[in-house]
Image: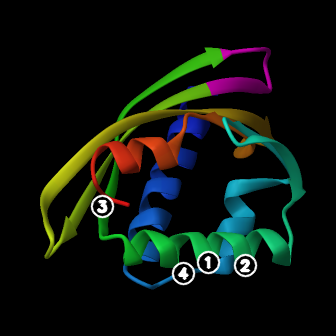
Amino acid sequence: MDEAVRELFERYQNFFKRSLAADFDKEEVAKLYASEFIAASPAGVMAGKNDETLVQAMAQGYEHYREIGTQEMRIRGLRLSPIDDLHCVAHVSWTATYVRGDLPETAIDFDVHYLVQILNGSAKVFGWVSGDEQALLKQHGII
């Protein structure tokens, strides 16, 4: 389990890096997420499908990240909490780096807790729980 989940988040981090460089691969999105997923944040709880709607939302999200000056999203820590032989919570600590002409380079640390399923040796995200990203960005003057 550990190896499959670590490989998933290595791919996720690399996907994020390429997407920030405007090299968004919609086929890679499908490989990262399960066919359906749930997400929870202070904005509420939502459920969705791994379809064109997700691809469009992700593409728009990365465009927004580029617009606000996101230069890098790096995993600084990964801890797993197994649920059973096929599921775990991956506690991922990220560092986001922002660079814009109107503010100094800014690094922000945050955590996201991903629900992961391993089927046939392949790990995919089927959900996540995150904090208030908008409040954190406002606190640091990014938005």
Q: Residue at x 44, y 85 (%)?
A: 22
The residue shown at (59%, 28%) is 90
The tag earlier along the polypeptide, 4 or 2, is 4
Residue under pointer 1 = 59
Q: Residues within 10 Å of mark 1 (few under 14, many from 20)?
A: many
Q: Which residues are magenta?
A: 82-89
Q: Earlier in the sequence, mark 3 or mark 2?
A: 2
Distance from Cα at disc 4 to Cα at disc 1: 7 Å
Q: Which residue is mark 2?
A: 56
**Amino acid at dot 1:** Ala
Q: Which residue is mark 3?
A: 72
Is tag 4's residue or tag 1's residue first in the polypeptide sequence? 4
The reply to whether discs 4 and 1 touch (Cβ–Cβ < 8 Å) is yes
Q: Amino acid at mark 4?
A: Phe
User: Measured from the top left, where is residue 61 in percent x and y?
Assistant: 57, 69
| SS state under label 1 | helix
**Circle 3/circle 4 CB separation < 8 Å:** no
Q: CA distance from mark 1 to mark 2?
A: 5 Å
Q: Which residue is mark 4?
A: 24
Say which quarter of the image contains residue 60. bottom right
How far apart in space, not on screen, are marks 4 and 2 (Cα)?
Answer: 11 Å
- Vertical comparison of 68 with 91: above or below: below
